[in-house]
Amino acid sequence: MDIAAAASTGYSYRGPSKIYRREGPIKKIFLAVIAAASLAYAKFFGGPMDGTSWDVKVSPESLFSFSQRGTLVFENGMLSLSGRLASGFTPALYLSKDGRGLADQAWNASLSSAQDGIINWQGFVRGDRIEGIAVWWTKNGKPKRFSFKGRRKTA
């Protein structure tokens, strides 16, 4: 197939023996609608971890650093931090799914701060325990890794 034939049939030409089918706009619109519906559902109806708070101990993955205590709060489809962990990070949507036998729930969220950068949280819930990792991407672009463990906060 030559370049003219590829263009007339909805294919794109990318060099010898590299002819690809173009993605139609319908597929992109469909995927955008699904993503928007998922985010709206989480925002308005919450997620499976909503209404829970967790006391956690966050430890840097370095030799000479001290751990910090704080609270992870899941409410209305959002994760927020309290205590010393918060320091300007705004609440953000979290995603959660079944842990497929390894855990009750697996979740992740990315919280941002104009001054401090972005922290990506990923964790697992097993019964009344939570654990995972957090990677803090500072403003200068260097990642700092942390691990965390904790228990469900009791009233």
Image (cartoon, grey):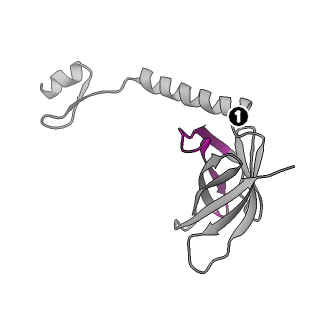
Determine if the magenta segment contains residue 77: no
Left-right relation of 123 to 3: right
Question: Camera-side residue: 147 or 86?
Answer: 147
| 71 relative to 132 in the view: left or right | right
User: Residue sitting at 55 percent across and 68 percent down?
Assistant: 140
Magenta residues (range): 93-116
Instruction: Name the secondary structure under disc 1.
Output: helix
Q: Residues within 10 Å of mark 1 (few under 14, many from 20)?
A: some
Q: Position of residue 126 (x, y in %)?
A: 64, 47
The amino acid sitting under disc 1 is Lys
Q: Residue furthest top?
A: 9
Q: Quadrant of residue 84?
A: bottom right
Q: Quadrant of residue 59?
A: bottom right
Q: Quadrant of the N terminus?
A: top left
**Closer to the camera, 98 or 79?**
98
| Residue 78 drawn at (x, y percent) | 71, 43
In the rendered image, the residue lying farthest to the bottom is: 64
Residue in the picture at 22% in, 24% down: 7
Q: Looking at the magenta stretch, what is its main secondary structure? A: strand
User: What residue does disc 1 label?
Assistant: 43
